[in-house]
Amino acid sequence: MATILVVEDEKPLSSILGRALKKADYTVGFAYDGEEAIEKAKAKAMNPDLILLDLILPKVNGFKVLEQIKKDPDVSHIPVIVLSNLGADEDIKDAFKLGAIDYYVKAQHPLLEIVEIVTKFLKTHRVQAKEE
């Protein structure tokens, strides 16, 4: 069973997404600001297989979170999918430059679609990891 760290400061949205992921048999952890996201990504107890990251966060924004995760050799291998309301081309390009593996604008993707995206990614990612 994969562990997913959901980084989202809007608790109602985080809760709904978390329930949908748990229903799909994932273990889910939550972070509600950028500092907590960095701490939980690095925590051995959490050990996420995937991070779903909002970019608009209190304390430390999602771009900085992504940058810090990808610069740390202990956690840089964790794939990060960005889920944000920021849809400008520049924001999307910046997220990919910093190491995001995918980017979705929340308003354009229903939560069930996000769960399907996560499932498809993790299946593909695990197959590739087994082949290596």
Image (cartoon, grey):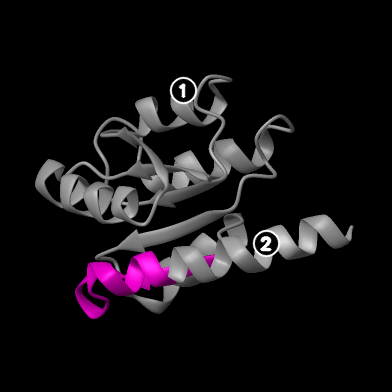
Disc number placed over residue 121 in the picture, else none:
none
User: From this viewpoint, which residue is outermost toward the left?
Assistant: 12
Query: In this figure, which residue is indicated by the disc labeled 2?
Result: 125
Residue found at x 35% / y 61%: 83
The residue type indicated by label 2 comes to: His
Disc number placed over residue 39 in the picture, else none:
1
Does dot 1 land on a helix, a strand or a loop?
helix
Q: Which of 131 and 12 is in front in this view?
A: 131
Give the vertical position of 96 relative to 99 (above or below): below
The residue type indicated by label 1 comes to: Glu
Query: x%, y% of residue 54?
Result: 33, 52
Residue found at x 36% / y 65%: 115
Disc nearest the viewer among 2 and 1: 2
Give neighbour class at mark 1: few <14, some 14-19, many 20+ (Cα, 10 Å). some
First in sequence: mark 2 or mark 1? 1
Give the vertical position of 88 relative to 15 (above or below): below
Residue found at x 27% / y 70%: 112
Does dot 2 land on a helix, a strand or a loop?
helix
Query: x%, y% of residue 118?
Result: 46, 63
Q: Nearer the viewer, residue 25 or 51?
A: 25
Residue 57 horizontal side relative to residue 126, left or right: left
Query: x%, y% of residue 27?
Result: 41, 40
Q: Distance between the residues labelled 2 and 1?
A: 24 Å
Per the rendered image, the range of residues in magenta is 101-116
Query: x%, y% of residue 117?
Result: 44, 71
| Magenta stretch holds residue 46 | no
| Residue 84 figure quarter | bottom left
Residue 87 horizontal side relative to residue 80, left or right: left
